[in-house]
Each structure stands twice: as C-alpha cells, then as structure tokens.
Image (cartoon, grey):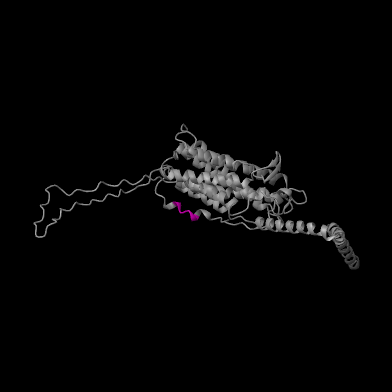
Amino acid sequence: MLDRVTAFFQRMGQLAGRGLGLLVAWLIWPFMAAHGWYRGRHWMVKGPILVVLVLLGGLYGYFVWQTQVWTGFNANYVDNYRWSERTVAAGQELPSVAAASATPVSPPVSAEPGAAPATAPATAPVSQPPVQAARQCQSSAIVDVAADLTDMTVNQNAWISSMVLYKLGLFGVDWDNTPFLDNKASFQRGVNQAVRRTSVELVDTLARMRGTSGVNNNLQSARSNLQFDEYSWYFGFSPFGPKTPTPSYYRAAIKNLRTFNTELAACSVVFDGRGDNFVQFIDRIANDLGNTSAILKERSENYNGGWFDTRADDRFWFAYGQLYGYYGVLAAAGADFSQVIRERNLGPIWVETLAQLKAALRIQPAIISNGREDGWIMPTHLAVMGFYILRVRSNLVEVRSVLDR
C-alpha cells in the first residue's frame, strides 16, 4: 500500500515537471526561433534590429522603474503643512500692524558760530503719517493641497496611464487586466479623482460670493485641465493625429491653482467659507466616496479569486489613492473652514474623521487579495477598504447633519 502511494506521488511529480517543461519550451520557442533567424542575417539587417531592441529595453526599464518607485508618497503628508498654526479662515484678512513711526522734527540749528539756539516752537513735535501696510488675506489650504497632489502625480512621478508602454499593454492585454505594473497608475487616478471633485466645488461654490459672483478664470481653467482624458499620449487614433499628453494639462492646472492662491493672498479674489458652502462640499465628497464603496462592493461580492483576481488590485489602489487625496483635502478644509468648525463645535468629530482616513492609509498589503468574506486562507482586502470608506463617509454624513441643524 505504501509503495502504491509513493508511486502515485512520483507519477504526479513527473507529470508536473513535464507540464512545466512544456510551458517553458512554449514560452521561449519564439525567442529561440527569432535568435536563429537573426544570427543568419547580414549586419545591415542586424544593426537596425539591434538598435530597436536596445531602445525597447531602455523604454521598458524606465517603465518598470517608474511603476515601482513611488516618489513623494507619504501617508502622513498632512503633518508637513502645520495648518494648526493658522489663526484665520481662508479668504479672511490677516491681522496687520501699521508701521506708524512718530519722528519728531528737531529745532533748526544755527549756521553762525556763537549764535543763540533758535527757540523751539510751542506746538507739539510733528510726526510722520503712519504707513498703511498692504492688505493680506489668508490663502486656501484646499487649493494648496490640490496643487501639491497634482504636482506629486505628474512632476515628482511620471503619469503612468499615458505612457506609451502602458497603453500598449502586456502583449496587447490591458495592464489593468493583469496583476503586474498597474498599482501606481490606479493610485494616481484615485488621487486625481479627489482633486477633480475638489476643483469642481472650488469653481461652483467656494470661490464665489453666495453663488452670484462670476466664476474665477484660474479655477475654471484648472477644472477644465484636470477633467482632461487620463490616457492621452503624444499621438492617438481617436481622433487620429498628434495630441497634447495628459501631464501637460495637469501641469497647467497646477499653475492655475497656485495663481488663484496668490491672488487670494493679495485679497483680489474671494473664498466664501460660509457654513452652507461647507455643507455642500462635505456632501459632494461623501457621495463620491459612496460611489467608490459601491465599486468595491460589486467586485468583492461577485468575484472571489483571492490572490488570483487580477482586477482586485486596481480597485483597491484606486480607492486608496482617493482616500489619500481626500485625507489632504479634508484636513485642509478643517483649516479653511476653521471658523465654522469652531462655531458649530465640530472639533471632536472632525478629528475623528481625519483619524479614520489616516487609519485607512495604513493598509498597504504587498499582494491584494479578493477572497471570500468568510474565507480562512485568502484575505479580502477590498472588503476591508470598503469598511474604512464607509466609516469615513458615515462621519461626513454626521458632520453634515450637525451643520444642517
């Protein structure tokens, strides 16, 4: 009996080894055939082919490097802004001290030696008029974060989704349908989703006085640039012809956002930090997170491939990037709407909301698994991320209910 069991496992091992050998042979056969053909060609044929291969090798090396190295990523990046040191809300005039110096006028000095000094006038010394300092207003922390997040995705890093090798895919298969080299692209698109939503609210409500003033041109341009297609390269087929790549539009949006903040600091534009604007801003972000929660729920319930679900990592890192962006945006909103939060006693729940966002960003698994919720071997990272999103959204809904009272 023991001999039969041993023979069975030996046979299984032989079959597995033979199958693996056939798979390897099938994979390397095209390369071996190409090598044989290349070796028999003239150098005038070999030269251009070698140049193309070296170029492709360099491009793929750069592509792999950019997808694996995340420059500027810091789950605690909000701590670097030190918004707690701000004393006034966004758009309000900063307290200034006029440089008023009183310089008394000295009595005239006699030009002749031995002459008696001139009699001082009976009136009080004449003082110089005070110098009125230029008005300065508090810039917007939300605008700063939106510009910095975009700068991280397109300047500190390459925008992966519009790179030509990302568009070509893995032997024609979309990288999003593979478990390789697509996590950073999904993360960047998640961050961009948060910035896009923020730019819309800046244009429609936050940078307009009670919704009746004109739209700010810089913010309008920033919103249009951030809404541009995330996958554009220098050339495309729909429509056919040369194009402006995606990163160029996003870099223009950064410039638009920073210009608006410069004008806001000079008190030449407005930031309307009223409570009803804060309510609408919170409500739109909560709705956006609700949509992402539904995407995670659909994937988690209908696909249980565990570590073999090739789309689970896309969903996870998109949601992670969105939370990464909203962590900064909401922390900035706490500074821009500090007066509203203070007047409505929202401090504790606001701190709890940011703490939930920070806790979600600590989930950074090496391999994303979409297992069953009651499974015991493969974890379900999508359900965990969806749980944190719903907790954040629940806190935002509670903030909105307090503001509505």
Number of disc labels: 0
Vertical relation: 376 (above or below) 223: below
- Does any portion of residue 184 appear in the rendered image? yes
**Which part of the image, by quadrant, shows the N terminus?**
bottom right
| Left or right position of 192 against 271 | right
Report the magenta stretch's main SS. Answer: helix
Q: Is residue 370 above or below residue 46?
A: above
Residue 305 point in image, percent of width and height: 74, 50
Say which quarter of the image contains residue 239.
top right
Residue at the spot x=56%, y=53% of the render? Answer: 359
Q: Which residue sits at x=61%, y=47%?
A: 247
Q: Is 176 positioned to the left or the right of 292 in the image?
A: right
Out of 293 and 40, give the one closest to the viewer: 40
17 or 99, which is in the foreground? 99
Residue 220: x percent and y percent? Answer: 53, 38
* Farthest residue, direction bottom: 3
> Could you say where residue 347 lies in the image, as x and y percent from the top left?
45, 47
Residue 294's image quarter? top right
- Image quarter of the C terminus: top left
The magenta segment: 79-83
Q: Residue furthest top?
A: 212
At 71% across and 51% down in the image, what residue appears?
165
282 left or right of 134?
right
Q: Nearer the viewer, residue 109 or 130?
A: 109
In the rendered view, tell whether residue 188 sits above or below residue 4. Answer: above
Residue 346 at least partly seen: no
Q: Nearer the viewer, residue 105 or 297?
A: 105
Percent from the top left, x then y, of residue 340? Answer: 43, 42
Q: Is residue 93 magenta?
A: no
Q: Measured along the vertical axis of the image, is residue 186 above or below residue 40? A: above
